[in-house]
Image: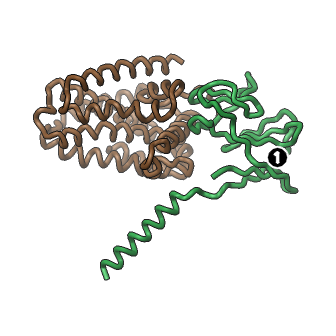
Chain colours: A green, B brown
Amino acid sequence: MTGGLFLLGLGGMGLFSVSKILPRPPRKILVKEELKPGQILVRDGFFLRLTKDGPLALFRRCPHLGCPVTYDPQREEFVCPCHQSRFSLEGRYLAGPAKKDLTRLPVKKTEGGLIVELPA
Amino acid sequence: MVSGVLVSYPFHEDIPLVSTVGLETVIPFGSFWRAFHYYTGQLTFLLLIWHLVEALLNRAEKRRPLWRWAFLVGAFPLVTLALFTGYIIRGDQTGLAAGQIAEHLALKIPWIGILIDRLFFAVSEGIHRAFMAHIYLSLGVLAVSGLWHFRLRALKAEDLSLWAVVGSFLALVLPVGLEAPNFEALLKGPWFFLGVQELLRHLPPFVAGVSFPLIPVLALMGFPLAPRPLALILILWTGSYLILTTMGAVR
């Protein structure tokens, strides 16, 4: 009886641990604001702006070590405050240790606004 | 430890920055207790380094078996990690960035990286794990290294009082800052992390953020096996870390 309970507890803990290790599903964020040309919307996980080709959402995690990237209005660039990697407004890598572009996120237009899909 | 218990009551890990600001502004003497907790934590770290140097100079490794020496040296990375998680759980811009860096570095470690991340960081899901790690690491240092070790070297009440006075003085004179998220273009991490932060600008993350900080820990643990070459490694490492820290500080 005790051994069974112990095994049950152990199994439960194992399942719980596995559930925590497995990747989480992507998050979908609804943006209701109407974007004006030139405006950059800064949210917790992403930047959103209008381009000629439509809305562009960029993940705010630096490809180097995941620091939240900020917007530098003087240079009109995105900058990682941790190690100063720099990115253009299109998310292209410009300088610093990141060596990669910012990740582009899928954006969907809906009647209620724009839906940005953040990775797990 | 006592100040940690006091500041943990108004702290909510779901809203770390809001509750830290609340602690500073709403709770009576909250600002003092937070600063006292911060400075006594820093003093613990510095005094541990002092104690370690003192032990090395007195050749303390000769008087105990290798496993016990390595076990005692283990207090050093534990206290460093406890201090580091303390920065993460503030939830301000430095804390969030420090958490992200720690998570990414942990995940670079082969095999056990994901376990280390899940135990101490996983900040993409919030600061809950870092908060628990901060508490358990502090308790672990006290229970395992502290209480057991204090039987060999008594901790005098006058020494504790002296450092409590120093901590109180620093807390009254130097406020501990917080940065609002999203605005800083240059973030400097905790002072003891500046060297690693600087090296991360120049070398791959695994080399700069995992291998390099492990060098002194392994050199200290294995010190009794080859004291002279390992002492040289420790001196060289400390010198290079001081240079890197200075470079990071003047940015």
Can you say which quadrant of the picture contains the N terminus of chain B?
top left
Can you say which quadrant of the picture contains the C terminus of chain B?
top right
| Residue occupying image coordinates x 64% and y 58% | A25
- Judge whether B2 appears above or below B178 on screen: below
Q: Give the image location of residue B62, x and y in percent.
A: 12, 32
Category of crowding for the residue at label 1, using alpha-carbon neighbours closer than 10 angstroms: few (below 14), some (14–19), many (at least 20): few
Q: Give the image location of residue A17, x and y in percent.
A: 46, 61
Disc 1 on helix, strand or loop?
loop
Q: Give the image location of residue B106, x and y in percent.
A: 47, 43
| Residue occupying image coordinates x 48% and y 25% | B199
Q: Give the image location of residue B13, x and y in percent.
A: 50, 51
- Judge whether B241 appears above or below B14 on screen: above
Residue that badge 1 annotates: A33
- Quadrant assignment, res B211: top left
**Is residue B139 found left or right of A41 in the rendered image?**
left
**Is residue B75 found left or right of B28 in the rendered image?**
left
* In front of the other: B165 or B228: B228
**Is residue B29 something that shows in the picture?**
no
- Judge whether B53 appears above or below B112 on screen: above
* In front of the other: B82 or B204: B204
**Is residue B64 found left or right of B45 in the rendered image?**
left
Q: Amino acid at mark 1?
A: Glu
**Is residue A9 something that shows in the picture?**
yes
Numbered marks: total = 1
**Is residue B19 found left or right of A58 in the rendered image?**
left
Task: Name the outermost residue toward the bottom.
Answer: A1
Which chain's residue wears label 1?
A: A
| Residue occupying image coordinates x 12% and y 38% | B64
* In front of the other: B28 or B131: B131
| Residue occupying image coordinates x 36% and y 34% | B214
